[in-house]
């Protein structure tokens, strides 16, 4: 059973503990964007300067290189798995240096990604080169690629232009390294600054987007995502770093702290520019849950104020993350299937709360083959509205999926659709 190491109360921040190569195949959720900061494989006993002191560049055993073939095999494996988790119009950002970025670039093309840009992040305050035998390392590279050659991706051109003095933003970003206030909950050896993650998230996602980070570290990706009204799933092996991530999320649940951090993030013309932009961003579409019921049971709905969805995947594994059902506001009922056409009914309910429960805690389902359910509590009992049956937006959505699901002999539709102005 796959359970989160941490799940925030607002259901917008999830952490899994383990190797992403093992965990990614265990769930089916698709993401709008991936940010990956994989091992650079530069822990080769080299030296650097930090705060005026000579220090080792070694980050940990996870960052040690075992040769060219090892690096390529490692990158190929996780990139294949991550590709399966991206929506068809999704994009991926991958950071690196010369130690790993050439391997990444080659494999992206091998796996049929389309590379869009290679961002050069020029650091304002890089450590000096004390050997004086080559140029000072003052930049990292971030590859931006989309999943499919012919499926368009999202790019917030107007905002990026606005942040660059009303000129097209170039692929060289001059931004400072990590600030002291970003380490309030602890230190991670390769922590990225919020300025970098904020820019790339705003450039490539819309509000409410799901973002995956398979090498989460201290979850700068997740903190930036939540501050910007996006949702996040991070994966990491180290308990220490997962706890830093958790504490960073709990920290920004304080509205005052979150607002202060938004004003401190570099890359904006004024301290209030980010806040003003987020206020003006289009609100996400209304999330509508579709619930299936047999035709003979429809009349019972007016007596019910609770509805149950299966909370397991096809292998009966428990699902608790990341799940859009938690954000649904209305539940509309459809029927049919099982050799009968799908059709929209006139029954709906306003959702009050959604929780997951074991079958042993639900009266009447103790002997069910399904182990876990989502319990949807309504604000009142189901009511009827004849206009729902004729709602073309929902009916069109059902028709889009109808042929596919009948072809695959599936008995019910997916439980969610995004629709605007349903009522």
Image (spheres, helix red, strand yellow):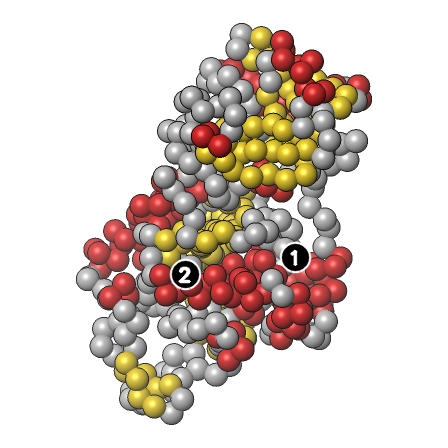
CB contact under 8 Å: marks 1 and 2: no
Q: Quadrant of the C terminus?
A: top right
Q: Measure the alpha-carbon separation of dots 1 and 2.
A: 34 Å
Q: From the viewer's side, name the closer residue of 52 and 138.
A: 52
Horizontal and vertical percent position of residue 275: 71, 65
Q: Position of residue 147 (x, y in %)?
A: 47, 44
Horizontal and vertical percent position of residue 133: 29, 87
Task: Give the vertical position of 229 relative to 32 (above or below).
Answer: below
Residue for point 70% across, 60% down: 278
Which label number is shown at residue 362?
none
Q: Residue furthest bottom?
A: 52
Residue occupied by mark 2:
242
Query: Residue at the location (40% across, 89% down)?
Result: 51
Residue 157 tag number: 1
Which quarter of the figure has residue 394? top right
Taking the image as shown, residue 63 lies to the left or right of residue 355, namely left
Left or right of 26 on screen, residue 143: right
* Residue at (49, 32) in percent of width and height: 361
Of residues 321 and 420, which is closer to you in this image? 321
Residue in the foreground of this view, choosing between 204 and 184: 184
Q: Position of residue 322 (x, y in %)?
A: 50, 44
Whether residue 243 is visible, yes or no, is: yes
Seen in the picture, residue 389 relative to 218 is either above or below; the reply is above
The mark closer to the camera, 1 or 2, is 2
Q: Is residue 391 visible?
A: no
| Mark positioned earlier in the residue sequence (1 or 2) | 1
């Amino acid at each position: 059973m796959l359970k989160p190491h941490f799940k925030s109360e607002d259901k917008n921040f999830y952490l899994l503990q383990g190797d992403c190569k093992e965990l990614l195949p265990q769930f089916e959720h698709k993401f709008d964007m991936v940010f990956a900061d994989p091992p650079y494989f530069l822990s080769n006993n080299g030296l650097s300067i930090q705060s005026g002191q000579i220090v080792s560049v070694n980050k940990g055993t996870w960052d040690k290189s075992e040769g060219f073939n090892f690096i390529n095999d490692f990158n190929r494996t996780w990139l294949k798995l991550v590709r399966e988790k991206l929506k068809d119009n999704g994009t991926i950002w991958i950071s690196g240096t010369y130690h790993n970025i050439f391997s990444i670039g080659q494999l992206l093309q091998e796996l049929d990604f389309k590379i869009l840009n290679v961002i050069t992040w020029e650091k304002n305050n890089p450590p000096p080169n004390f050997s004086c035998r080559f140029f000072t390392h003052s930049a990292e590279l971030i590859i931006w690629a989309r999943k499919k050659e012919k499926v368009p991706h999202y790019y917030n051109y107007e905002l990026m232009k606005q942040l660059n003095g009303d000129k097209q933003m170039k692929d060289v970003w001059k931004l400072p390294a990590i600030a002291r206030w970003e380490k309030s909950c602890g230190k991670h050896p390769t922590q990225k600054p919020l300025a970098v993650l904020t820019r790339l998230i705003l450039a490539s996602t819309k509000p409410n987007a799901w973002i995956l980070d398979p090498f989460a570290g201290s979850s700068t990706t997740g903190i930036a995502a939540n501050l910007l009204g996006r949702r996040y799933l991070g994966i990491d092996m180290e308990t220490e770093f997962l706890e830093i991530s958790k504490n960073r999320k709990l920290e920004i649940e304080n509205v005052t702290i979150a607002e202060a951090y938004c004003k401190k993030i570099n890359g904006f013309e004024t301290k209030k520019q980010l806040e003003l932009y987020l206020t003006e961003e289009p609100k996400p579409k209304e999330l509508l849950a579709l619930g299936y019921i047999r035709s003979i049971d429809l009349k019972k709905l007016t007596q019910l104020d609770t509805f149950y969805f299966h909370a397991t995947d096809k292998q009966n594994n428990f699902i608790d993350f990341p799940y859009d059902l938690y954000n649904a506001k209305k539940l509309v009922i459809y029927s049919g299937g099982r050799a009968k056409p799908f059709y929209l009914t006139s029954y709906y309910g306003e959702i009050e709360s959604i929780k997951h429960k074991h079958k042993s805690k639900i009266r009447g389902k103790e002997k069910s083959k399904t182990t876990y359910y989502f319990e949807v509590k309504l604000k009142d009992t189901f009511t009827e509205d004849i206009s729902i049956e004729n709602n073309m937006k929902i009916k069109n959505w059902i028709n889009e999926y109808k042929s596919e699901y009948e072809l695959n002999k599936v008995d019910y539709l997916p439980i969610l659709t995004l629709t605007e102005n349903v009522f």
